Amino acid sequence: MKVILLQDVKKQGKKDDIINVSDGYANNFLIKNGLAVPVTEGSKKILDQELAERKKIEDERVLNFTQIANELKQKEILFQVKTGKEDKVFGNVSSKQISEKLKEMGYTIDKKCIKIENPIDSLGTHNIKIELHKKVQFELKVTLKK
């Protein structure tokens, strides 16, 4: 029997997959527990509509993130830091500080999206990677000055 999964089912498939399972397993476990529905023309149409709607929403999100990325690529974030002997910076700049600075500029970017490969602990300009979406990644310039 062919069924459409409504949730991820271990060792069977992911949500919205159409899988072929035995009649007993489908009726007594998957359908009974609300994990799947039988494949019919109606259920297939509903699945196609939901997938198209999700794709449209995802495309809008990617477009929005791309616009933000294009704006931020041209900008630079400036941090005034305290230094010691030989211009050694006290501490370093974290992703949280960068996120807060972006928020002040009008961009709400989660600190988890900011990928800092090397610690930002010296004066000068540093490039950091920001990943807004798996399809939208860019580099942002962060400058430290006394």
Image (cartoon, grey):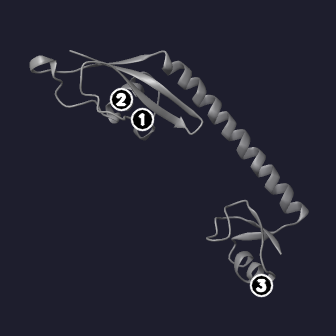
In the displayed orientation, state which residue is furthest to the right: 41
Residue highlighted by disc 3 = 24
Q: Nearer the viewer, residue 101 or 142?
A: 142
For this view, does 93 lie left or right of residue 104?
Answer: left
Front-lying residue, 70 or 138: 138
Up/down of 16 relative to 124, above or below = below
Name the amino acid, label 1: Ile
Q: Which mark is residue 114?
A: 1
**Mark carried by residue 2:** none
Q: CA distance from mark 3 to mark 2?
A: 55 Å
Q: Are marks 2 and 1 in contact (CB under 8 Å)?
A: yes
Other-residue count near label 3 (Cα within 10 Å), few / some / many at <14 / 14–19 / ≥20? few
Task: Residue 21 in the image: state x and y as whole percent.
Answer: 77, 76
- Say what secondary structure mark 3 lies in: helix
N-terminal of the pair, mark 2 or mark 1, is 2
| Residue marked by disc 2 | 98
Q: Is residue 47 above or below residue 5?
A: above
Q: Secondary structure at mark 2?
A: helix
Determine the CA span between mark 2 and mark 1. 8 Å
* Picture quadrant where residue 77 is located: top left
For residue 82, what is the image quadrant?
top left
